[in-house]
């Protein structure tokens, strides 16, 4: 009864080491049992399961956010709009929806570096970044980035000069945050499409510079 | 709820697991995510209630189990509490009783993507109630503690910060999770200095911004 | 240290495991207990440092593993930090290098029982330094946070209580754990009303008493 | 090389269910390795391991505390001494030592019920009560008894009337606490020895009445 989605691995972990993990087997069985019972009860349409995974794996993702950033870099009017009403500006590009009904864009500058977290769960701007990577949801990231953001960013390879203030944005309510990274030097002649290629997911979370 | 999920500022969790740079690494995680999303449309519980159910996972499991397994445990809890499944069904995957299918309609394949793209109304732009606090004002976060769902992280409780922005009138997560409806109120972005929060441990003159509903705040 | 060990008031841990009414239920637990006790006499670390090492066990292990296994992990940490064993020795149980036996003498069978019966001097009865606070006085617990060992439970941080008694001048655990010597100071019993600590969640007009060193307290 | 102590079970768990527990096997191996290495290095005398366990399993324990309580019930002068200087009064009966260098005795009355915890680790008055039972060290007891003492005591079967105040003593520094339970009614003619038989460990922690 269990339908496979793309990239199926029969419910086993496919970490780098391909180890046999009894914990993950337990989880796979648990999920399979739940799926079978809620499908049998008519609470869930199995096709909807496939389509929602497909939507997040294929349609949304950090490319959306990158397009927004690249446009902001090349279109001053759009950038003003984005920083003043992120939700509307982003929605105008066709990106909206669950876990991104209200998006605030925050700009990195020479004076301030911004970084986003959700200490209480794993809030993340799905319409522009897709689903969160596992490290973003880890206890280490969630606990430490509000207390020692500079030490955390250093682990990501990002050393923030002491003259630059760090601002951490904890997504505790309904607003989701998108960081507008600093535009890299020497990119003056690039098109928005070329620029979008340079924008990384971590740059838009604030855990990387570009 | 003062549970394990409230991790801001807690110590001992070690290095950031940079190597865990995946969204799904097993198919069961994809199915778990999809199940939680799809169930939201056919069941009487909402996102805030699902968060609260995750918070009720025992701390030992919360830390030991995979993120998506905790999501599934939360869904099981809510389905049991709603009387839609029982423990034996969850253990075996075999149906023991039927539910009222007229009340609980599954979301379709096309419909779920459309609804996901549309999102939900969480803000009340036409609500003109006055804001209690103004940008630039100092506020103290309530010390109130509760066993219910709340979105005040423990690390700002009782601390003084400054209103950075009024985000507008939003549904109030505490009320929504308690099944009391939206109870709309202003929600503010409040900034705290690192020194206020961490004292001598603060790394620099940095700033932590937290979104807080009006009910959580007191004038200083 | 704001780690998992600081459990007072945390939620989600469920029923009291009344059935766990044993001291040891496996022989390895006895050996673990005995090892920690015996090692204390031959090594440069003390009880407060051992507590701090337990606090540094990862939260996931702290909750998942047996109490005595965490004690052993702490001893391993301290032995490694003191350069008395290395990781490979701990994994194999096979010695790779010798230590200076003149500096590290094991406690004998009779001696350990005598020393246990005698206890250690933790109080300085002849220290006549004046007490900063008087019985009946209101005090606020410092909000200071530290990554080091401290004996202020998080649940009283920043809260106002009343001095119930001056217990006398004691060695200061924070200093002892940091290897800074006894740094003697007054230690007080401070009572907090349940309402002060838990607000609306308080069950009744009850009272929670906590022993707090003078450094932790501020006049109100 | 591993020496057995009394009640040895070869390093396996001997819980009620005698189940095979890989976690406990790991712990047993870990402890054995540590013992072997520290004995080989001369840091530990194996005989000392046996004698310290023997001391706590045979010599100290709640019978010590029970003798103190029974004497306090039958000797008003001793009771005054115990409540004013617990350490000295208890030491006069031969009970002293590690984790009990400073003991404060607290009396239950018709107005106040007292209960002891250590929220930060597992501090417990070893010279009078022996080593702590596992539940005393459990996250559930440590987290809950300061926040909802009445609910916790109810799980122990002890319902505290609303007219009685509960006082929780969190052992956060060097003082250890011994609760003096209320003397049961109808025991006026009993000797101290008979009374001592009635005093339970949980009565002296405060999680039971007598």
Image (cartoon, coloured by chain):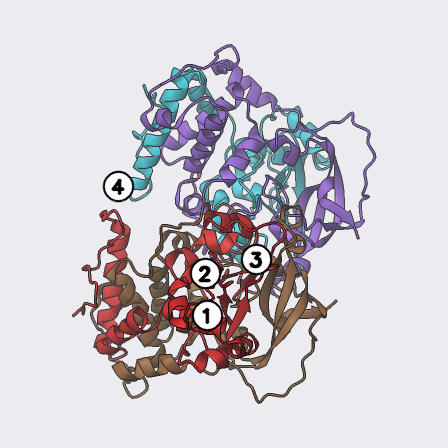
Chain colours: A cyan, B purple, C brown, D red
Viewer-proximal residue among A206 and C61: C61
Number of the label disc, if any, that sits on residue D57: none
Alpha carbons under labels 3 and 2: distance apart = 45 Å
Q: List x then y, in percent, for residue C167.
A: 59, 76
Labels 2, 4: front one: 2
> Mark 2 sits on what residue?
D203
- Label 3 crowd (10 A; few <14 / some 14-19 / many >=20): some
Vertical side of D197 occupied by A155: above or below:
above
Whether residue C104 is visible, yes or no, is yes
Q: Secondary structure at mark 2?
A: helix
**Residues indicated by labels 1 and 4 sit on the same polypeptide chain:** no
Labels 3, 2: front one: 2
**Residues indicated by labels 2 and 4 sit on the same polypeptide chain:** no
Number of the label disc, if any, that sits on residue A148: 3
Alpha carbons under labels 3 and 1: distance apart = 51 Å
In the displayed image of the protein, which residue is found farthest to the top?
B102
């Amino acid at each position: 009864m269990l339908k496979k989605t793309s990239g199926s691995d029969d419910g086993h972990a496919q970490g780098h080491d391909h180890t046999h993990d009894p914990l993950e087997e337990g989880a796979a069985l648990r999920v399979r049992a739940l799926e079978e019972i809620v499908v049998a009860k008519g609470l869930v349409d199995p096709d909807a399961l496939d389509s929602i995974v497909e939507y997040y794996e294929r349609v949304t993702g950090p490319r959306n956010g990158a397009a927004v950033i690249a446009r902001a870099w090349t279109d001053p009017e759009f950038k003003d709009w984005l920083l003043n009403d992120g939700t509307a500006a982003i929605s105008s590009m066709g990106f909206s929806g669950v876990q991104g009904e209200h998006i605030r864009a925050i700009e990195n500058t020479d004076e301030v570096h911004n970084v986003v977290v959700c200490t209480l769960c794993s809030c993340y701007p799905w319409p522009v970044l897709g689903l969160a990577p596992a490290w973003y949801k880890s206890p280490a990231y969630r606990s430490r980035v509000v207390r020692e953001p500079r030490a955390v960013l250093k682990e990501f390879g990002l050393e923030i000069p002491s003259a630059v203030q760090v601002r951490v944005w904890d997504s505790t309510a309904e607003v989701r945050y998108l960081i507008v990274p600093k535009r890299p030097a020497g990119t003056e002649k690039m098109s928005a499409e070329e620029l979008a290629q340079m924008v990384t997911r971590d740059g838009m979370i604030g855990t990387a510079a570009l | 709820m003062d549970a394990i999920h409230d991790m801001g500022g807690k110590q001992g969790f070690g290095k950031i697991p940079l190597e865990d740079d995946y969204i799904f690494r097993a198919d069961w995680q994809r199915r778990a995510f999809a199940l939680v999303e799809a169930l939201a449309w056919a069941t009487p519980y909402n996102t805030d209630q699902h968060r609260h159910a995750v918070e009720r996972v025992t701390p030992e499991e919360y830390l030991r189990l995979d993120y998506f397994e905790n999501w599934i445990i939360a869904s099981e809890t809510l389905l049991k509490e709603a009387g839609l499944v029982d423990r034996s069904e969850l253990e075996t995957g075999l149906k023991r009783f039927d539910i009222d299918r007229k009340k609980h309609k599954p979301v379709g394949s096309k419909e779920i993507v459309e609804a996901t793209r549309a999102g939900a109304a969480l803000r009340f732009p036409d609500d003109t109630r006055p804001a209690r606090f103004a940008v630039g004002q100092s506020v103290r976060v309530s010390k109130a503690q509760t066993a219910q769902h709340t979105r005040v992280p423990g690390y700002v409780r009782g601390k003084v910060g400054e209103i950075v922005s009024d985000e507008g009138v939003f549904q109030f997560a505490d009320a929504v999770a308690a099944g009391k409806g939206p109870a709309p109120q202003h929600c503010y972005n409040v900034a705290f200095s690192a020194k206020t929060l961490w004292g001598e441990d603060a790394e620099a003159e940095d700033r932590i911004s937290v979104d807080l509903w009006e009910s959580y705040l007191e004038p200083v």
